[in-house]
Amino acid sequence: MDLGLADAAAVVVGGGRGMGLATARCLADDGARVAVVARSADDLDRAVDDLTRRGSPDALGLVADIGDEARVRDVFAELGARWGGELNILVNAVGPDVQGTFDELDDRQWQQAIDQGAMGMVHCVRAALPLLRTAGWARIVNFSAHSTQRQSPTLVAYTAAKAMVTSVSKNLSLLLAPEEILVNVLSPGSIASEALVGWARSVGVDGSDPYALMAGIAEHFGHPAHLPRAGLPSEIGPVAAFLASPRNSYMTGADINVDGGSDFT
């Protein structure tokens, strides 16, 4: 499907690997100019090489810790200068790396989860809005998580941060609707990301096998999907790309589950 992204200017925050990179690839495949933002320069170098091979004009990578608002402002100022002051697409695909039960987490870990998982998104939207408002059309896609709907005791801080992402995104969709800037949330389920595969390995589960991975999730978390396997990052990218495209012309304020059916019960 032609998503109408030729020459569109897109930023994928957290685009160096995993679901963010899968999204950046889909945008590049459709002809968008794609910038990826991440903390790892090595990840960014590999991502930019990949996006360039896919034909993305002017693909670039920018190193940033999105918890640092000043650095985020600099990133979007650089993009504005490079791309004529306009931005069509902002995708925020960063999640916090904090696990533990309520009894185990201290204040520092709670703050880390909120800073990584929610305030980074706030910083990026705040810095991007002037560029998005200048463009002829604009979309924001923020990644939340299905764990906001199905709780896991060890993900209490992660889920709280993602719930903030969902709530702020819905409020933004209301605020920006008169300007026809569409804001949507994508909530992945159990996706074979590096983090989830690493967890599987730590408990003796073969994370490279999506079926074994889902069996491990069912055993350890009690949250199997109706489909008998975990999802892949490549199955998230096309959904995010559609939400970010002009083909999505009348959906805003939605929270889209891509979770193998795990929200049915």
Image (spheres, rainbow, N blue to C red):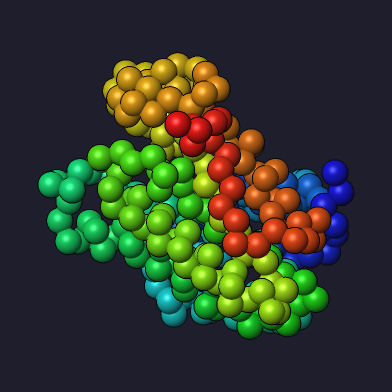
Residue 250 in percent (x, y) is at 75, 61
Determine if residue 54 is in view: yes
* Placement of 26 over or under 223, stated as above or below: below
Q: Report the side of 125 relative to 28 (left or right).
A: left
Question: Which residue shows up at 58% across the image and 77% down it?
Answer: 175
Instruction: Answer with the quarter of the image where residue 151 lies.
Output: top left
Q: Is residue 16 left or right of residue 156?
A: right
Q: Quadrant of the C terminus?
A: top left
Q: Is residue 8 above or below residue 152?
A: below
Query: What is the x, y in percent for residue 253?
Result: 60, 62
* Residue ID at (55%, 22%): 227
Q: Residue at x 19, y 61 (%)?
A: 108
Residue found at x 83% / y 64%: 7
- Compare residues 212 and 42 and report the one nearer the observer: 212
- The image shows residue 126, relative to residue 203, as above or below, that is below
Q: Is residue 207 visible?
A: no
Residue 242 in the image: state x and y as whole percent.
73, 51
Question: Of 169 and 234, which appears nearest the observer?
Answer: 169
Q: Quadrant of the N terminus?
A: top right
Residue 26 picture location, percent across and down: 72, 47
